[in-house]
Amino acid sequence: MNNKKALFVWILRIAVAALFVFAALPKLTGQPEPVQVFQSLGAEPYGRYLTGVLELVAAIIFLVPGKGVFGSLLGILLMAGALGAHAWKLGFAGSAGEMAAMAAGILLACIVILVLRPARQD
């Protein structure tokens, strides 16, 4: 992998890790919006806590050299689940649409990281 491509992948990994941390903190601290979202899904509080912890785990994995594949796969699963929740129950109107757009962007970033990772190391 050339240096520019490797740098781009690392910047993307750091950005996605930061987004996962920023997404996890409101879930883990019981902020009203995630509580309401998970109540509407019938998964409050355990679904909220599990999702927050998995988002933190994904963030940590993204920052560990050589583990980008695992971070990408976990991120893809989390964001596919988020988009599924929007399609199934939450909808796409108003702030729900903004959250869905963010999930779609993170999903795309995780796929790009997975595709652009080096063959032997990342």
Image (cartoon, rainbow, N blue to C red):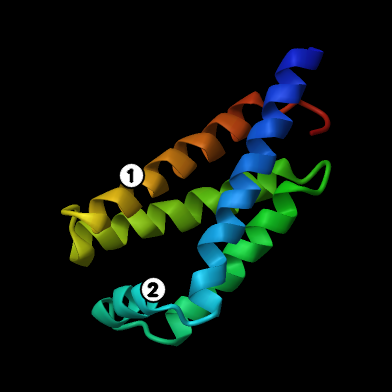
Q: Residue beneath label 1, please?
A: 101
What residue lies at 68% left-to-right and 28% top-to-bottom? 9
Residue 1 visible in the picture? no
Q: Is residue 119 above or below residue 59?
A: above
Q: Give whichever of discs 1 and 2 has the lower sequence position.
A: 2
Is 44 placed left or right of 60 in the picture?
Answer: left
Taking 120 as reference, is 19 left or right?
left
Structural distance between the alpha carbons of marks 1 and 2 = 16 Å
Which residue shows up at 64% across the image and 49% down it? 17
- Tell me which corner region of the image, top left, top right, bottom left or bottom right, holds residue 57: bottom right
* Residue at x-position 37% and y-position 58%: 82
Image coordinates for residue 37, horizontal then vertical, percent:
31, 73
Q: Residue 31: x, y in percent?
A: 44, 78
Can residue 90 be seen here? The reply is yes
90 sits to left or right of 116:
left
Q: Describe the element under mark 2 as helix, strand or loop.
A: helix
Q: Is residue 104 above or below residue 74?
A: above
Q: Secondary structure at mark 1?
A: helix
Q: Amino acid at mark 1?
A: Ala
Give the position of the N terminus as an image quadrant.
top right
Q: Position of residue 16 (x, y in %)?
A: 59, 44
Q: Residue 117: x and y, percent?
A: 70, 29
Q: Characterize the local packing of mark 2: few (<14), some (14-19) or many (20 or more) Cα atoms within 10 angstroms.
A: many
- Mark 2 lies on residue: 34
